[in-house]
Image (cartoon, rainbow, N blue to C red):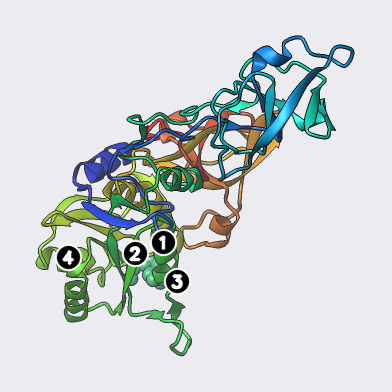
Amino acid sequence: MLPIGEAQKKVLEEIPILGRERIYILEALGRVLAQDVEAVRDVPAADNSAMDGYCVRHEDIVGANSSNPARLKLIGESPAGKPYSGTLESGQAVRIMTGGIIPKGADAVIMLEDTEREGDFIICLNDPGLRAHIRPKGEDVRAGEIVLNQGDVIRPPEVGMLATLGHAYVYVHQRPVVAILSTGDELVDLDEPFTQGKVVCSNTYSLAAQVLDCGAIPLSLGIASDNVDDLRSRLNDGLRADVILTSGGVSVGKYDLVKDTLTEVGMKVKFWKVAMKPGKPLVFGTIGNKPVFGLPGNPTSAMISFEQFVRPALFKMMGRKNLFRSLLDAVLAQDVKVSSGRLHLVRCKLFEKDGVKIAVSTGTQSSGALRSMVMADGLMILPPEKAPFKAGDKIKVQSLHTDSPLSPTSHY
Ligand code: AMP
Ligand code: MG
């Protein structure tokens, strides 16, 4: 049985990074830049005012205060979008609004609140200093700078920056299509009658949701019964996808035919069985350069295996740099039994007490139990060689909510 860290490494070694596509910036939210973005102009493009007030020549108001005010002639205005075209001479002021362009000759803005108006004159009651309240040209971004880099995830600020720089379209990495096949004679789909002995096929939906959550595109192949012909035919339907996921049928049961049928349709097995609990019977291989994951059938095993192997793989395909979840330090609230030689991933809630995270098991850890997965904030990472685990022990918890901030390190 392969240790989980080695299995994850073997998976990532086989994962190709997908090519580029050019899309509209709003569609690019959550996608990964496949180009550097260079500023073609300064932002802001010209010196402009950060305040409502008056543009002045600073030398005219040096040292001004309420007992020694400066008096300037108002000669015009420079509202945002309509710059004043003339030049400010000594003894003159121009009314300006926030965002208005600073006219030639001016080198400071005095706030409206620090002035009084007397007909065509303004009285300055304050000296705000040279270049006060002027946002200089290029303060935010200078022409020629690389502002966004290939590999950056596009979040709302990146969308804003692309817009500011005038990019309506941008190159991002393509999204993989991920075929999902559930297997098992006992499974019924949501639109089929549920009778005694049957199990509702939930994996298709939880896995498709995980695929969507990664930003990839699920393609449901339905449910295959436990026979080679049906499996083969449905797997063939999935060959147009970039990634194939199956669930169920990869253990050593009499009807566990998935691994052999995958091999029959061309998969080269890279490994089978990982030293983790839940999730042991996972098989991983490739058809050409297409990764294939034969996930275990138990609903939580399938989801947790997806978290460890498929999610980082999809992120890599989509050009992401940080592939992994955050790893948090926590303290165990209770004793936890580690009953096998495999790495245990225990579903837990996290509470904060005196600045310390406390990890509490979410209850039954059966690999079929979805409830404890629903309640989980994270997965305790409990290596068997460090057992026993007692209340108060320091442990690591893999967050199920947050991604690792920039340092792309695995957990194992
Ligand atoms: P298997 O790995 O095929 O032996 O399945 C292990 C357990 O997971 C069995 O109890 C199955 O009924 C259950 N199971 C397998 N596939 C699914 C699925 N798509 N949705 C829900 N439960 C499943
Ligand atoms: Mg089965």
Helix, strand or loop at label 2? It is strand
Circles 2 and 4: CB atoms closer than 8 Å: no
For marks 2 and 4 on the same chain, the one whose residue lies earlier in the sequence: 2
Q: Which residue is mark 1?
A: 212
Locate residue 122, reporting x and y percent: 79, 28
Identify residue for label 4: 262
State the separation of the CA atoms marked 2 and 4: 21 Å
Horizontally, is 391 left or right of 137 in the view? Answer: right
Q: Earlier in the sequence, mark 1 or mark 4?
A: 1
Please name whichever residue, 19 or 399, is drawn nearer the observer in this view of the structure.
19
Q: Which mark is residue 202?
A: 3
Q: Does ligand 1 reach within 8 Å of label 3's beta carbon?
A: yes
Which amino acid is tagged 2?
Ile
Please indicate whether residue 127 sits to the left or right of residue 370 in the image: right
The location of residue 357, given as percent across then percent down, is 64, 34
Q: Quadrant of ligand 2?
A: bottom left
Are discs 3 and 1 less than 8 Å apart at CB? no
Q: Amino acid at mark 4?
A: Leu
Q: Are marks 1 and 2 in contact (CB under 8 Å)?
A: yes
Residue topped by disc 2:
217
> Would you say residue 103 is visible in this rendering?
yes
Left or right position of 396 against 216? right
Residue 25 occupies quadrant: bottom left
Q: Nearer the viewer, residue 95 or 248?
A: 95
Indicate the position of residue 46 as horizontal and vertical percent values.
49, 32
Distance of label 3 from label 1 (alpha carbons): 15 Å
